[in-house]
Every structure is written in structure tokens, then in C-alpha cells.
Image (tube, helix red, strand yellow):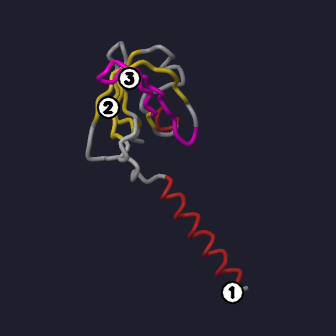
Amino acid sequence: MRALSVALIVCLASLAASVSAHHSPAMFDMQKRVTLTGTVREFQWTNPHSYIQLVVKDKAGKDVEWSLEMAAPTYLYNNGWRPSTLKRGDTIVATIAPLAKGTPGGLVIMVTTADGRKLGGNQP
């Protein structure tokens, strides 16, 4: 019985560690903010995280696709988001915490839609 209890504790501890690692913002540079203006290629209303695929022109005028992570739909819904909030072709301004490794992606802090609505991205 004692061995079973120890095994259960080990399993639960490893599960808790993986869950907390999943929600870690370590991949983002939370000290920086980047503002992007671009065109929505896709808005993914999915669990456990929603995403915006945003096409942004770089300094040379070339299209670069950014993958922007957001909170789960439940949190987004509470912040005014709906599955139909963004559509392919919409122009938005997104403020993000960029990926720490420097590739085109980040964590959405705020989005301003073409009609001027401001919506948060990751605060429950």
C-alpha cells in the first residue's frame, strides 16, 4: 500500500510540474513590447490557446507571418472576444511580448481592430 501511495504522489507531482511548465511565459520576452500592424491570415479559436496568424510587412516590404499566441477561448470570451471577432483579411494592430528567440511570434497583450475596439489577449 505504501508503494502505491508513493507512486501516486510521484505521478501527481510530475503532472503538476508539466502543467505549470505549459503555462510558463519563459518563451516570451515579457520585458519588451512590439507593436505590429498587419493583415489577419487566420484566427484560431482553439483550446488550450487561441492564435492569430498575422501577415506583417518587414522593412524591405516583404510579407512575414507572425504567430501570435493568446489565452484560452474562455478567457478571451470574458474579455469581449468572440470566434467571429477577427476574419481573414482584417487589418489589426497587435501589441505583443515577442518570442525571446527573436523569431516572428509572440504573446498578445492587446489588439486594436480596424473599427478601433481594443481587446486584451491574455489576462483572465
Tell me the magenta residue range.
47-67
Looking at the image, which residue is at 31% across and 47% down?
Answer: 30
**Position of 72 relative to 111 (above/below):** below
Residue 44, how many percent across, how many down?
Answer: 55, 29
Determine the CA span between mark 1 and mark 2: 52 Å
Q: 1 or 22, which lies in front?
A: 22
Callout 2, which amino acid? Thr
The relative height of residue 11 versus residue 100 in the rendered view (above or below) is below
Helix, strand or loop under label 2: strand
In the figure, is residue 98 to the left or right of 66?
left
Residue at mark 2:
95
In terms of image quadrants, where is residue 91?
A: top left
Q: What element carries label 3?
A: strand
Q: How crowded is mark 3: few (under 14 residues within 10 Å), some or many (20 or more)?
A: some
Q: Do the residues labelled 1 and 3 touch (CB within 8 Å)?
A: no
Res. 55 visible in picture: yes
